[in-house]
Amino acid sequence: MSAQAHGRAAAATAPRGADPAASDAPILELADVHRRFTVGAGLFRGKRTLHAVNGVSLQLRRGEVLGLVGESGCGKSTLAKLLLGLYAPSAGEIRVDGVALATLDRRGVARRIQPIFQDPYSSLNPRKTIGTIIGLPLDVHGVEPDARTRRRRVEAMMERVGLPPRFFHSYPNQLSGGQRQRVAIARALVMHPEVVICDEPTSALDVSVQSQILNLLEQMRRELDLTYLLISHNLAVVEHIATRVAVMYLGRIVEEAATETLFRAPRHPYTQALLASVLTPVPGLGVPETQLGASYPDPTNPPAGCAFHPRCPHASAVCRERAPAPLVDAQGRVECHLYQV
């Protein structure tokens, strides 16, 4: 069974994120962005350089939902923190509407780009009430200084995300997981940002609640004219809500295409392995064989040539010697020697 069948219970009611009004002009753009960390390696080895993001060029167009997928440790969350301004690139440039992100102050970035984190149990301050949590961005940015006006704005956002007004004085531990994630969404949207970075926004929730949160995100995108970067391991969620998908491997984008195109005809061997790895509910089929092996390459010592070649069933001598150049065509973008002419 294909990846399309996986996770229907969570995503079947979520409408597809396609929006014909989405602009071709990128609201966010990464140009050959790198992020390196210096890490220690114990008593007998010196410090090493970890290449978390290794030359990413990517565009996020206004009004779209870009899905970012890949194994744990491939650099997805580091990329999200770069876009939020929490990390500075080691090389390359990030631009917001053509303006370098590095030239904007932290508050200016926060007003335009907001995150929704994976775990609503740890992303909310347990000592603050729901009304205070949602209204805190208004306070930090000096919006609505009048307490009554600020409360009305907070309550209006609570209503939009499906939170009853009686929760205004409640604490996070008095709410369910789905309700806490609605609080996190309300906090992210109360300033009316342009871009929302959704880092696994449903993975910590029950399956029965996941579709409700996905529907809410899609509804908010339409009503508030939002642009999403959706990071997820759930390929069914990505297939249902994303308009375009970027596949990340060892710090690089190895394939990028429209969602329907990528799921119908994946080109990069790693993308093919990801789609083949989806577990199915059919008894007797067992665990899918992806031929990727059990080990992940060391990001402090990436392989020469194509980074995927040690795990690729189609690897040849050229893959071990030279990194593939990006190929951009009508189907999208792919980095693989199989498609070099």
Image: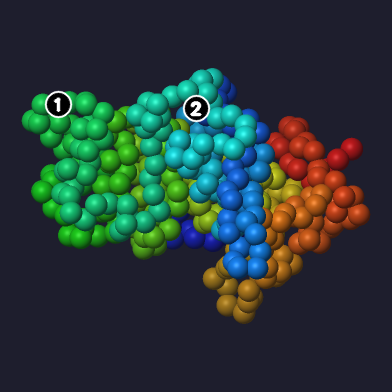
Residue drawn at (51%, 36%) of the image: 88
* Rendered location of residue 48, percent (x, y): 64, 55
- Disc ID at residue 102: 2
Question: Is 202 placed left or right of 313 in the picture?
Answer: left
The image position of residue 172, as x and y in percent, is 21, 55
User: Which residue in the structure is indicated by mark 1?
Assistant: 145
Q: Which of the pair 28/282 is nearer the observer? A: 28
The location of residue 82, given as percent across then percent down, is 51, 39
Q: Quadrant of residue 327?
A: top right
Quadrant of the image containing the C terminus: top right
Q: Earlier in the sequence, mark 1 or mark 2?
A: 2
Q: Amino acid at mark 2?
A: Ala
**Does residue 22 show up?**
no
Residue sticking out furthest to the bottom: 284
Q: Nearer the viewer, mark 1 or mark 2?
A: 2
State whether residue 41 appears in this view: yes
Q: Which corner quadrant of the image does residue 133 belong to?
A: top left
The answer to whether the residues at label 1 and label 2 have Cβ atoms under 8 Å apart is no
Mark 1 secondary-structure assignment: loop
* Residue at disc 2, secondary structure: helix
In the rendered image, the quadrant that contains the N terminus is bottom right
Instruction: Please tell me which residue is depicted at 72% across the width and 54% down the height of the picture.
Output: 302
Residue pushed farthest left? 148
Q: How many marks?
A: 2
Q: Is residue 148 above or below residue 314?
A: above
Task: Determine the CA span between mark 1 and mark 2.
Answer: 29 Å
Q: Residue at x 36, y 60 (%)?
A: 205
> Left of 172 or right of it: where is 212?
right
Nearer the observer, 124 or 23 = 124
Residue type, mark 1 in image: Pro
Mark 2 packing: few (<14 Cα in 10 Å), some, or many (20+)? some
Residue 269, horizontal then vertical, whole percent: 75, 54
